[in-house]
Image (tube, coloured by chain):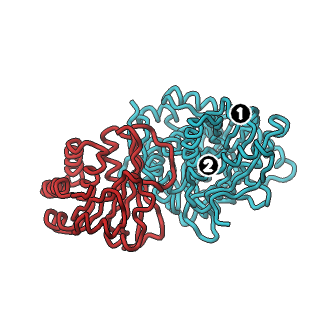
Amino acid sequence: MSKLVEIRWHGRGGQGAKTASLLLAEVAFNTGKYIQGFPEYGPERMGAPITAYNRISDEPISIHSNIYEPDYVVVVDETLIKAVPVTAGLKKGGAVIVNTAKSPEEIKKELKYDGRVYTIDARKISEETLGAYFPNTPMLAAVVKITGVIPVETFLNDIEASFKHKFANKPHVVPKNMEAVKRALEEVKGNE
Amino acid sequence: MAKRVSLSGNEAVAFGMKQINPDVVAAFPITPSTEVPQYFSQFVANGEVTTEFVPVESEHSAMSACIGAAAAGGRVMTATASAGLALMWEMLYVGASMRLPMVLAVTNRALSGPINIHNDHSDSMGARDSGWIQLYGENAQEAYDNLMQAVRIGEHPDVQLPVMVCYDGFITSHAVENLEMLDDADVKAFVGEERKAPFALIGQDPVSMGPLDLPNHYFEHKRQQAEAMKNAKKVILEVAAEYEKLTGRKYGFFEEYKMEDAEAALVLINSSAGTAKTVVDALRAQGKKVGLIKVRVFRPFPAEEIAEALKNVKAVAIMDKVDGFNAAGGPLFNEVVSAMYGKADGKIVQNYIYGLGGRDVTTYNFEEVFSNLFNAIETGKYEVYNYIGVRE
């Protein structure tokens, strides 16, 4: 990857789309990339639609506007598909990644989008591995795999180290989080 | 060895303050600057700094406490934005007139009303005549670098003035980006272990500060203050040269980006200059002779130098993220045009008011401005005072 990759996240306040975008920035940073991670701040309330952004590049990034023509769109809450024009400006060669139990074909019809559509059931993975609904970790893994902004092997090593750091007081949750990551890498599926 | 990090602008400034370890920080929280005193108070609580943190009840009190601490000879810092800066107004003038070096991190935010938490330059531009030195930065790196240099500039014996370090609210303050931080030891060596105050309320040779100053002396004190601001120009460049030796990063009064043979140019401040650079690159790739000037030092104003930098352009758009509501042009426009008078005459000069209240400033905006400039060069027809990116 030599060129700039631009990613737009759609979520609802409280679901961690902003945190996920910052995590992605962090893992890309750790592999030597230039990164930006920033949310679009509005009247933030639990459940209100929010947008967050990532730019990732091998070169320094000087642009400081929001992203209008993203390479990838990530939808953390599928109910937003009916509320927000999530694919607006999405590049023709781009892709959209949706957190849903539905198939890529079904989501593609709902989105009315011609490009690549990927789905990941982050709720199921999260509930089965972590015992509660934390969509961030599986979504992050799916985004890394589909966008290819960093190699999956590098990501696996890096994310394990950061889980060990983050959960230093409860190391027993590290394997559960790693299982969520690995399942997401396997279970994200696409209509290409 | 400098350390490569990814931080938000507010984190970069708070970590920079930690490395500087000032004597006193007095602050009151306000969006989007809140994180600066928030993070810093954690450093205080954790014993990572020896600073006395004064949690005050308003920004007027924050600046008053800073003035008291600086008058006692301390190295003093604070942070604010928008209405918080407005509430400091009275005390900003007092601090500058008492010739007290302090560093104030301003996360630029619109002023009410209507109430708006997002970025523009109404707050610090409104304080442009308060006697403070003003440094502006495009991104987290520049906010951090300006913070370090601000300490040295303000405390220089020939200056003795407070310094605002301004960076864009949310766009810079809350976005995580790459930057390089200095080693703690390098920061200590650069800023010095402690402030050497030439006069103070306490110590061996205490002085009285802030008494009534009647017509017999007030004017002379203002004259000295004006001289200090003139001296700051030399000191800013000296400090920048020393900082460049330490970091390799070059700073001056402003950055000239692809200006060598530019026919059409922009002059602007802070984060949007970064966005405009990508448009300059794209237009250069099409063979168009375009460039931009990003102003870093607004007070003191580098009038002669800006006029010199613009002497070969045909058309220039001076862009203000604030309106002064004089029905003629924003503050940057007024200052640049004044500077050009008699030194860079006969140019097409336009003013654009942009990005008020956090309206996103895009590459499309700058493409339109350059297109207008080239159209003006071709036809000779143009408006001077314009708004861009607004619904009319």
SS at mark 1 in the image: helix
> Label 2: chain?
B
Percent of width and height locating residue A14: 34, 68
Q: Is residue A169 above or below residue B260?
A: below
Query: Which one is closest to the eye, mark 1 or mark 2?
Result: 2
Within 10 angstroms of label 2, few (less than 14), some, or many (20 or more) residues?
Answer: many
Percent of width and height locating residue B64: 61, 58
Spatial separation of the CA atoms under disc 1 and disc 2: 20 Å
The disc labelled 1 sits on which kind of residue? Ala
- Tell which circle, 1 or 2, labels the residue nearer the N-terminal end: 1
Residue at 63 percent of width and 36 percent of height:
B288
| Residue beneath disc 1 | B309
- Give the chain coloured red: A
- Give the chain coloured cyan: B
> Label 1: chain?
B
Percent of width and height locating residue B289: 65, 35
| Residue beneath disc 2 | B366
The disc labelled 2 sits on which kind of residue? Phe
SS at mark 2 in the image: helix
In the picture, residue A80 is in which quadrant? bottom left
Residue B97 in sight here: no
**Closer to the camera, B56 or B34?**
B34
**Closer to the camera, A48 or A175?**
A48
